[in-house]
Amino acid sequence: MKQCALFLVLMIWFIEPFDIHAQSGLQNFDILIKNGKILDGTGNPWFYADIGINGDRIAWIGESDDVTGREIIDATGLYISPGFIDVHTHAGPGLASESLSHGRPLLAQGLTTVMINPDGGGSLDIAGQRAALKEHGIGVNVAQFVPHGSVRREVLGQANRAPNTDELEQMKALVEEGMKEGAFGLSTGLFYTPAAYAETEEVIELAKVASRYNGVYSSHIRDESDYNVGLIYSVDEVIRIAEEAGIPGIVTHIKALGTGVWGYSAAVISRVERARDRGVEVYADQYPYPASSTNLTAVLIPSWAREGGRTEMLQRLDDPELIEDIKVEMVANLKRRGGAESIQIASYSPDRSYEGLRLSAIANQMGMDPIETALTLIKERNPQIVSFNMHEDDVERFMKQPWMMTSSDGGLVEMGEGVVHPRNYGSFPRKISKYVKEDRTVDLAFAIRSMTSLPASVFNLHDRGVIKTGQIADITIFDLDRIQDKATFDDPHQLSEGVEYVLIGGKFAMKAGEFQPELVGKVLKNKID
């Protein structure tokens, strides 16, 4: 029996894999990142250290000769950051498609997580949307909003009225259903119809539901300019909703849009600071460009003329008793946007030759004034536009605030489709290349914080956003000398450069500047307990 036992022990010793690193006393990780400068996401300056990753977590940070890894990244000369988080993106439909599920324009910016269904638009079926995203796999992590505009449309259609008691309960139930399915908050687009017909009290009641499930409130505010209630009132409305609903409030893609409100950034900042001083949790996010993007109908046609949807709007545009009043407001709205030279057509399927041209150039081609030209385009199809309407002083003043997150407001489209806003491809590298390196508006650690730990804390992503042990290994490694947005307003379909590695949950999405075939993103669910 003793001989048999000895034989079994010897057999086990020979069969068991021999780990040379364990035998030599080395600590072995799945991935070891060495020799890089770590920006931990907190706003602290960079420091040298190595990072050991096991599975999907950061297991060790330090400096030692007694560590190794099954895969070793030499990050000499590179910066190591938490993965970037985009808190406002329209990439949802693209990520749910087979051809764009890879999300490569996002990965090339260093993004590891994106928030979808912003501006109150998007799918109301949070569970169904999650299933659609999982169908082909996704290249980045996705977190979802419950979109208020979709909620309102489901219950009230395009009606310009307040909900009655039963209808409000239906709306609250839809928000609650989405939050229980793992959404991270409620988004609104109070500039757009039908959401523009909602009174503040309606939004407060729905935001209270999101608050019960650790949600946030993110709003494309009612007026970013001086269309109706004005920029200051609209920011105050977000503050009021956040305060009365007991929910973190976000003024999303914050801006002072149009010459009539240029310089108002100082007043907006004062409002937010005063609210925070009295304990209201208010934030904002911003994309680093002086131009916005939306549709031509929303920026030129008055909201009363859009009531009831496109069919009823077109009837009003053909009504000789109404069209002159509509034109009067269109003239004012065009002036507010900086005139026809400041509006560039981004996408227009009836005539692709108009894409990339300014409205003024198209008006010259048609031999009509800009208002008649705009009406002609809108009647055929609602064009997507890029609108040059911000002052650089306001962009920079907003960017310097400690409660300012970075976003893109970008979409995910087929390469070469339309002359889209370059923010689709370049927002995060641009903030570093232009506003850190060139203009020195903010420093690098401050910019990285706005992309990582700040959004992670706002959205309750407490196991992401910081480089520390125990955190999920969402990591972006970039070359500060090379990081650059290549996309321009005239030639937007260009991937950004300078991001060398992207890890999502400890798996490579980019390695040595090359996209990896495995789609390693997940659809995240909010922690509601």
Image (cartoon, grey):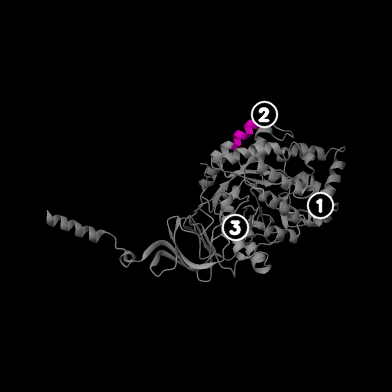
Disc 1 residue type (three-letter): Arg
Q: Residue at x 56, y 59 (%)?
A: 42
Q: Which residue is mark 1?
A: 336
Contact check, label 1 and label 3, Cβ < 8 Å: no
Q: Secondary structure at mark 3?
A: helix
Q: Which mark is residue 39?
A: none
Within-10-Å neighbours for mark 3: few <14, some 14–19, many 20+: many
**Residue 252 placement (x, y as % from top left):** 67, 50
1 vs 3, front mark: 3
**Residue 397 placement (x, y as % from top left):** 71, 59
Residue extent of the magenta highlight = 164-175
Q: Is residue 171 above or below residue 20?
A: above
Answer with mark 1 or mark 2, whichever residue precedes in sequence.
2
**267 displayed left or right of 59:** right
Asked if the stretch drawn in magenta spans residue 167, the answer is: yes
Q: Which mark is residue 451?
A: 3
Disc 3 residue type (three-letter): Met
Q: Which residue is mark 2?
A: 165
| Count of picture labels | 3
Q: CA distance from mark 1 to mark 2?
A: 38 Å
Q: CA distance from mark 1 to mark 3?
A: 31 Å
Contact check, label 2 and label 3, Cβ < 8 Å: no
Asked if the stretch drawn in magenta spans residue 338, the answer is: no
Furthest-front residue in view? Answer: 278
